Image (tube, grey):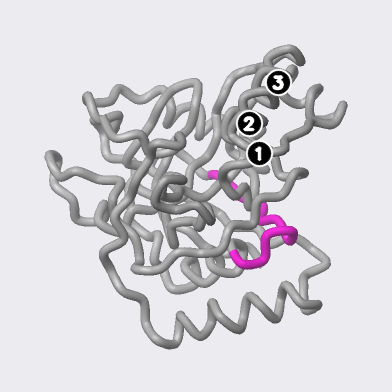
Amino acid sequence: MPNVIKRSYHAQLIAYPSIAFLIFLMFGSQAQAQGGGRTTKALVEVRTTMGTIVLELYNETPVHRDNFLHLVREGAYDSLLFHRVIPGFMVQGGDPESKRAGRESPLGNGGLGYTMEAEIRSQCIHRRGALAAVRLPDDVNPERRSNGSQFYLVQGRTYQSHELDLVMERNSRWGDTLSYTKADRVTYATLGGAPHLDGAYTVFGAVVEGMDVVDAIAEQPCDNRDRPLTEIRMFMRILE
């Protein structure tokens, strides 16, 4: 079974973006990061066949924010599937190949032919409802660059303070410095999340409405590849 989110995950990027989009990534997001940033947070509505989710995008991660907004404007996510679901952990979507995939088609390896620089921020943790980017594993992707389109929404579970200490100790053995504020510890103890992913993947937003829809998607019966037996499609638009 392919592991999409954990460190052993790998995805094959096989499609190619337009020249215009590459220019956008190189210069548009850079301009945002260098002082043209937003003062408010962008909101994206995700309509699914199980209900509606609203995502808030973080200004602390402008490359991922602007890429996601561009793809939403272009309709790139419309009719794609939530193709991998693990209850108590996360739901994943954004594979372009899922739009027309047959029931037996393997999913999770698709992309748009580019990756994005990591924007891993200590204040952007994998709390319940976090929006984060899928990526290739460290052994082939030491810079931890993100897949251009695939994302996941964290469902997670609660973690007590001593469990977070174990996560910090493990990351230290890997050479990663990770620490949690008192507020982070309260968040994981009360709301929950997936702290074992902290410091390794870019979190660039969060669910602000419709977490019950995420929970409903996570509870769907799946096949042995964690793909829901019932197709759950998404359609996105930016909320102005």
Q: Which residue is mark 2?
A: 171
Q: Earlier in the sequence, mark 3 or mark 1?
A: 3
- The amino acid sitting under disc 1 is Asp
- Residue 57: within the magenta? yes
Q: Quadrant of residue 31?
A: bottom right
Marks 3 and 2 sit apart, C-alpha to C-alpha, by 11 Å
- For the point 65% across and 58% down, the residue is 43
Q: Position of residue 12 (x, y in %)?
A: 29, 55
The answer to which image quadrant residue 187 occupies is top right
Which range is magenta?
53-63
Q: What residue appears at the point 39 percent right and 36 percent down from the top-left corner?
A: 8
Label 1 SS: loop
Q: Residues within 10 Å of mark 2 (few under 14, many from 20)?
A: some
Which mark, by number, is residue 176? 1
Viewer-nearest of labels 3 and 2?
2
In the picture of the structure, the residue carrying the numbered disc 3 is 164
Q: Position of residue 125 (x, y in %)?
A: 69, 38
Dot 3 crowding, Cα within 10 Å, few <14, some 14–19, many 20+:
many
Query: In the visual, does 149 lie left or right of 110?
Result: right
Q: Tell me the crowding category of disc 1: few under 14, some 14 to 19, or many 20 or more residues within 10 angstroms, Cα based.
A: some
Give the mark nearest the N terminus, 3 or 2: 3
